[in-house]
Image (cartoon, rainbow, N blue to C red):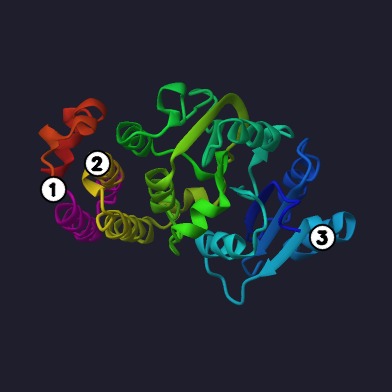
Amino acid sequence: MSNEIKVTVIIPCFNAASTLPRLLGNLLNQTLDGMEIILVDDCSSDNTVQVMQDARAQFGDRVIILQNEKNSGPGVSRNRGIEQAHGEYIGFVDADDIVDVTMYEKLYDAAVKIDADIADCAYMKDEKEGPLLQFSKEFCGNLTWGRKSGLISLGGYHATKIFRRELLLDHDIRFSDGYQLEDLTFLAESIYFAEKAVGVPELLYIYTQNDSSLSHIRKPYTYIQSVAAAMAFLFEKMSTLPHYDKVQEAVEYIETEICKDALFMARTLETPVDSQMRQLLLGVHSAIVHIPFSENRYIREKIPLDEIAIFS
């Protein structure tokens, strides 16, 4: 079967019964032939599994169902899917988001055309901001270290992309097991090891804000701790790579950006925990960021001085 599958799409699902049918409608009717859908249930308490089983009954072995033994988070679910995937390329979709029915044909054709390791498309998260495309033309083609550094600094969203399966397997690239920012290191490592990338300048993915997206508001302390853990994990994985110095500015910019946002959140808590969370974040940041802010071109260009002051 592996020779027949062009793209495997992995969907982590937790209590997604209300949104999964809409997503599956678009995925199972993609214009690309040779697709495989892996659904990973993360111990849902609603009818998510029934929706999965209905899709399996209708579409047969194009749909693979995996079930976690315990609730483990989206990172663990995606990693399980990677191990079971047969596609030449792998994509990831969140169960409540919206994909265009032409998305994977356009990504796959663009990737195959230049033998790219990663293909990306535009997405929309906020109507006011409009469509966003991480892999713009200036960063695509053969990935020099300059282009890799630029792409890492842009952050981006894993679900708008397809990744060559061999890239992930050969370099053991996986998601972290946290519940927040679990794709942070995955994206940085993928770009680091990729040789070619391509962008499709079309809006093909709509990001939908859900309850888990709002967890930083409902559970701010847990969120801040998760941010600190994600920062440490990114440094742990990237700093040991042989050419880390080529992308260090970009990685430290990303570390600083997410730390800054979490620090502003901690400052708004107005409780004794505020100080504890601030010290946690600053302690992790000082241990992993070594280039002075004034010497990091991404920080100079992208973070205003009045926001940098939060680190003082």
Quick one: label 2 or label 3, which is nearer the N terminus? 3
Residue 241 picture location, percent across and down: 28, 55
**4 sits left or right of 209 in the view:** right
| Residue 144 tag number | none
Residue 96 picture location, percent across and down: 64, 47
The residue carrying mark 3 is 61
The residue carrying mark 2 is 246
Q: Secondary structure at mark 3?
A: helix
Vertical order, 191 against 178 (above or below): above
Mark 1 to mark 3: distance in Å?
50 Å
* Rendered image quadrant of residue 27: top right
Please report the residue visible at 58 percent of the width from the left and 60 percent of the height from the top. Answer: 82
> Which of pointers 1 and 2 indicates the residue nearer the eye?
2
Residue at the farthest right position: 58
| Residue 290 tag number | 1
- Span of residues in magenta: 261-289
**What's under tag 2, amino acid-wise?**
Lys
